[in-house]
Image (cartoon, grey):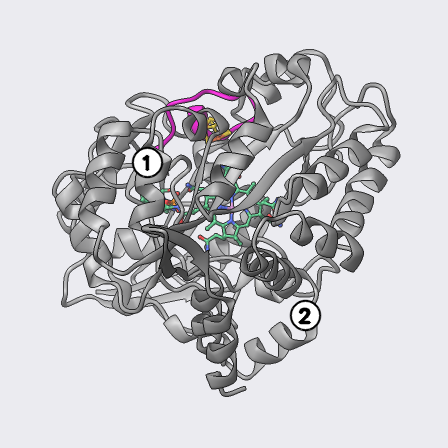
């Protein structure tokens, strides 16, 4: 059977907000996961519109499309195109799960929730000529899942080809998060078997890994076993976790020993009222600065996530948030305009209060205000969002944030990582155009490497070698 799998672009390349490097980071892991259930005899073409032009002149038997909110219209157009040609088209992913009635006219079959239980069932039914119109995920387990078909991923087109997820979902229930809607009808947080996760890690070439799990430190027992198993593997990795998991116990230390070098942390807001509004209980009364200091003492860089536009925010929130990030040496910041995704508790509340101002899903990109704001106008909120990005990534602020670290190498590492991510767009674009992006991986690995300086008075001095990064940089053939 000829199978086409497509991840339509989340933003069009013509869009002024298209940032090639951001969309060339990770391969389409969800689709490669599903491909594991197909037969080795199937002829599979997996295309990711973020990094390649789609070939739509082909004649597949089965078309599988992953639908996110901001690629929904592109996904539906592709689905219509292939259905008109007689292909059987199936749609799944976050947006289809939130709004199945919207997606239904564009699909032969819809999938709600994760695909590990429903997709193999569909394949069986499809083979028997009796596919159902809709499959709803109910069984939530990762036990016995087949290996991800990484052979279908065009590794050279990505900066971070080694993305991996070893858990699904999250133990928390923030009202703006997609998670509860997507995992409705079953467990909302579950993990792989540790041995399976370690085997998957072992299959990945090179040193660098990026865990895309919503909350890598969410299950302490699983985390402990995973990091114990990873010790001695020589890996460097990045991941995401909550403030409270950093402050609690010593799992984060174990992660650091296993190679954790940078962490995406959901700070989101400093206002207790906003945290309550978002049901983000896990951040309430937590000392953010202590969490930051703990990560820094372990040599872990921080990508802080912040949301603007919650009801307790006013016009000062932008400056306060940027100043705090610079003062606390946050390496990179990701700012979002609050976005009520359909299916979430936040969307339900806003709809009830008649605050949703547009249902054009292209605008649900966390850069655009799509609801009636309080305490500031939509224009002020968007302007503040852009100002925050510009301000945080000013050379002077990158410099100041770097200089707040204790050691010279920490300072340099911060400076290179933040500057490299935001200040060298033309170089990234050139590397992408010339298909050399993956060659810069040694540079990233160099910046993330942690080494031990010579023993002094019987203690290891943890340090990070920027030198290795610079040496690696020289080796990169541009
Ligand atoms: C990687 C990633 C990206 C990549 C792109 C996607 C990619 N290459 O896969 C990049 C970096 C570009 C990206 C960008 C953004 N992202 Co993003 N991203 C992710 C992330 C971290 C991992 C995705 C992943 O690989 N998951 C693991 C795989 C195994 O799961 P999966 O993809 O969901 O696939 C499974 C199911 O969905 C299902 N399935 C999916 N499709 C189909 C189809 C069929 C037919 C079937 C049967 C099943 C099926 O089966 C798969 C196996 O179970 C998720 C968080 C997460 N943990 O999922 C956020 C996430 C998807 N991103 C999110 C957001 C908010 C964004 C941004 C808006 C952030 C920002 N402020 O810039 C931008 C988008 C910009 C824009 N214009 O829209 C939100 C989405 C919220 C929502 N309701 O849509 C998420 C959920 C993060 C979060 N916790 O809020 N992102
Ligand atoms: S902690 Fe993060 S992933 Fe978990 S529910 Fe909240 S926003 Fe979603």
User: Which quadrant of the rendered structure holds the N terminus?
Assistant: bottom left
At 32% from the left edge and 65% from the top edge, which residue is drawn?
A: 207
- Give the CA distance from mark 2 to mark 1: 34 Å
**Identity of the residue furthest to the front in this view:** 457
Magenta stretch encompasses residue 113 = no
User: Which quadrant of the rendered structure holds the C terminus?
Assistant: bottom right
Eyeballing the image, is 133 above or below 332?
above
**Identity of the residue furthest to the bottom in this view:** 477
At 33% from the left edge and 30% from the top edge, which residue is drawn?
A: 250
Look at the image and give the residue range highlighted in magenta.
168-181
Between 282 and 290, the residue placed more toward the observer is: 290
Q: How many marks?
A: 2
Position of 288 with respect to 233 (left or right) is right
Residue 14: x and y, percent? 70, 65
Residue at disc 1, CB closer than 8 Å to ligand 1: yes
Eyeballing the image, is 8 above or below 254?
below
Mark 1 falls on what kind of element? Answer: strand
- Residue that numbered label 1 is attached to: 168
Position of 187 with respect to 241 (left or right) is left
Residue 182: x and y, percent? 41, 30
- Residue that numbered label 2 is attached to: 424
Residue at disc 2, CB closer than 8 Å to ligand 1: no
Residue 365: x and y, percent? 65, 43
Position of 321 with respect to 24 (left or right) is right
Between 130 and 218, the residue placed more toward the observer is: 218
Residue 45: x and y, percent? 33, 68
Between 53 and 145, the residue placed more toward the observer is: 145
Eyeballing the image, is 63 above or below 313?
below
At 60% from the left edge and 38% from the top edge, which residue is drawn?
A: 305
């Amino acid at each position: 059977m000829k199978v086409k799998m497509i991840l339509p672009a989340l933003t069009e390349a013509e869009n002024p907000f298209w940032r090639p490097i951001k969309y060339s980071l990770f391969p389409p892991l969800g689709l490669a996961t599903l491909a594991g259930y197909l037969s080795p005899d199937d002829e599979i073409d997996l295309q990711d519109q973020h990094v390649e032009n789609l070939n739509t002149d082909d004649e597949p038997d089965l078309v599988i499309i992953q639908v996110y909110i901001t690629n929904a219209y592109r996904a539906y157009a592709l689905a219509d195109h292939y259905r008109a040609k007689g292909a059987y088209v199936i749609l799944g992913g976050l947006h289809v799960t939130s709004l199945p009635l919207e997606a239904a006219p564009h699909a032969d079959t819809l999938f709600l929730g994760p695909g590990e239980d429903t997709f193999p069932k569909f394949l069986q039914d499809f083979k028997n000529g009796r596919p159902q119109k809709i499959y709803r995920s109910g069984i939530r387990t990762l036990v016995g899942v087949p290996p991800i078909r990484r052979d279908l991923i065009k590794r050279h087109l990505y900066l971070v080809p080694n993305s991996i997820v070893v858990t699904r979902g999250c133990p928390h229930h923030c009202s703006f998060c997609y998670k509860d809607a997507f995992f409705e009808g079953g467990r909302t947080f579950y993990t792989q078997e540790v041995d399976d996760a370690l085997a998957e890690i072992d299959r990945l070439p090179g040193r660098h890994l990026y865990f895309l799990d919503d909350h890598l430190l969410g299950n302490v027992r699983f985390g402990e076993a995973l990091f114990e198993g990873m010790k001695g593997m020589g890996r460097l990795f990045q991941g995401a976790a909550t403030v409270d998991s950093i402050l609690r116990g010593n799992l984060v230390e174990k992660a650091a020993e296993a190679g954790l070098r940078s962490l995406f942390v959901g700070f989101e807001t400093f206002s207790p009222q906003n945290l309550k509004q978002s049901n983000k209980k896990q951040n309430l009364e937590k000392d953010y600065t202590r969490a930051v200091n703990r990560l820094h003492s372990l040599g872990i860089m921080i990508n802080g996530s912040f949301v603007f536009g919650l009801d307790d925010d006013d016009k000062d929130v932008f400056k306060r948030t940027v100043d705090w990030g610079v003062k606390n040496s946050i390496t990179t910041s990701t700012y979002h305009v609050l976005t009520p995704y359909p299916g979430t508790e936040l969307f339900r509340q806003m709809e009830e209060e008649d605050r949703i101002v547009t249902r054009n899903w292209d605008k649900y990109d966390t850069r655009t205000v799509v609801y009636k704001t309080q305490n500031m106008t939509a224009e002020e909120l968007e302007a503040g969002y852009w100002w925050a990005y510009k301000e945080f990534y000013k050379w002077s602020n990158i410099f100041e944030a770097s200089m707040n670290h204790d050691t010279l190498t920490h300072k340099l590492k911060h400076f290179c990582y933040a500057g490299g991510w935001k200040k060298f767009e033309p170089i990234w674009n050139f590397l992408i155009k010339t298909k050399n992006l993956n060659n810069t991986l040694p540079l990233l690995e160099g910046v993330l490497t942690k080494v031990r300086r010579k023993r002094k008075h019987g203690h290891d001095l943890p340090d990070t070698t920027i030198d290795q990064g610079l040496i690696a940089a020289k080796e990169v053939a541009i």
